[in-house]
Amino acid sequence: MLSVPMLGPKGDDLDAIRYGLFLVSLLASIFYLGRAGESWYPLMPYLKAVPVGLLAVLVLISIPLNSPLGLLLLAALVLSTAGDVFLALEDDKKWFVPGLGSFLCAHVAYAAIFALVMTRFPMQAELWRFAVIGVAVLLAVGLFVGLKGQMGELAGPVGVYMAVILVMVSGALLVPATTPWIAAGALLFMGSDALIAVARFGTPFGGIHHIIWASYYVGQFLLMVGILRG
């Protein structure tokens, strides 16, 4: 979409920094993955902010600052980093709604990227794309109905969030010139959110927090790559 190389070379003096940012982001993500699901510890919010936060810095030094698509991608990653921090604070119940709001705004930013592209080019209309969207809607609605009884007063905000992420996923699948990176990234992001709902309102299973983090980070990375490379 932006036709910007993921890491380089861009012919400037920042290529080494781009590779360094990506490497540190990946290593920080792996480190955090190793501690996923542990009891809260004081460094958790800081460690959780690093992986996607560094992807945001990578985008910042790679995009033209007059590019609406690039700025929306940067906003999505910054908002996601804020959501990571909110959900890693000690009183996670207190900060759940701010975290939900941050990620909701991140999904709006991703959806806006896809909507902007669709105003310029016709959307992809293959039948399989609509089939995948249909399956995603059915699974999301089924999960929401199954967990609604445990959500209490959060049922409304969670329902709005679910609707927004379905719009984002639909855009990722229908956007012109979409790539497997974008579609896979959006679906992984949605899958991560679904498992967060299971962990918080349902019956979590062993290793769920590791799957949540791995699918989330890989999903964000794939979305970033797909949008930058187009």
Image (tube, helix red, strand yellow):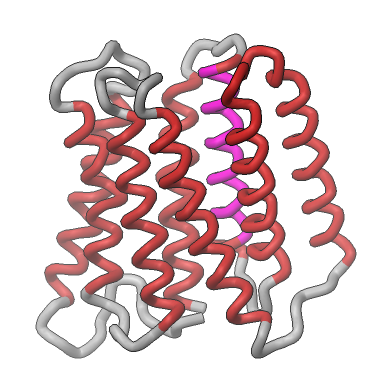
Q: Quadrant of residue 21?
A: bottom left
Side (left or right) of 9 relative to 170: left
Side (left or right) of 197 relative to 53: right
Vertical relation: 3 (above or below) 18: below
Q: Residue at x 58, y 53 (%)?
A: 186
How many numbered markers are drawn? 0
| Residue 199 belongs to magenta span | yes
In the rendered image, residue 62, in percent from the top left (x then y), is placed at: 27, 77
In the rendered image, residue 216, in percent from the top left (x then y), is placed at: 46, 42
Q: Residue furthest front?
A: 153
Vertical relation: 112 (above or below) 204: below
In the rendered image, residue 46, in percent from the top left (x then y), is placed at: 17, 36
Q: Residue furthest right?
A: 127
Side (left or right) of 112 relative to 160: left
| Residue 12 belongs to magenta span | no
Vertical relation: 220 (above or below) 127: above
In the rendered image, residue 165, in percent from the top left (x then y), is placed at: 62, 49
Instruction: Kindly report the secondary structure that dominates the magenta region of the rendered protein.
Output: helix
Along the line of sight, the residue nearer the viewer: 98 or 2: 98
Along the line of sight, the residue nearer the viewer: 157 or 193: 157
Q: Residue at x 49, y 63 (%)?
A: 109
Along the line of sight, the residue nearer the viewer: 7 or 95: 95
Q: Quadrant of residue 201?
A: top right
The magenta-colored residue range is 183-200
Q: Residue at x 28, y 11 (%)?
A: 39
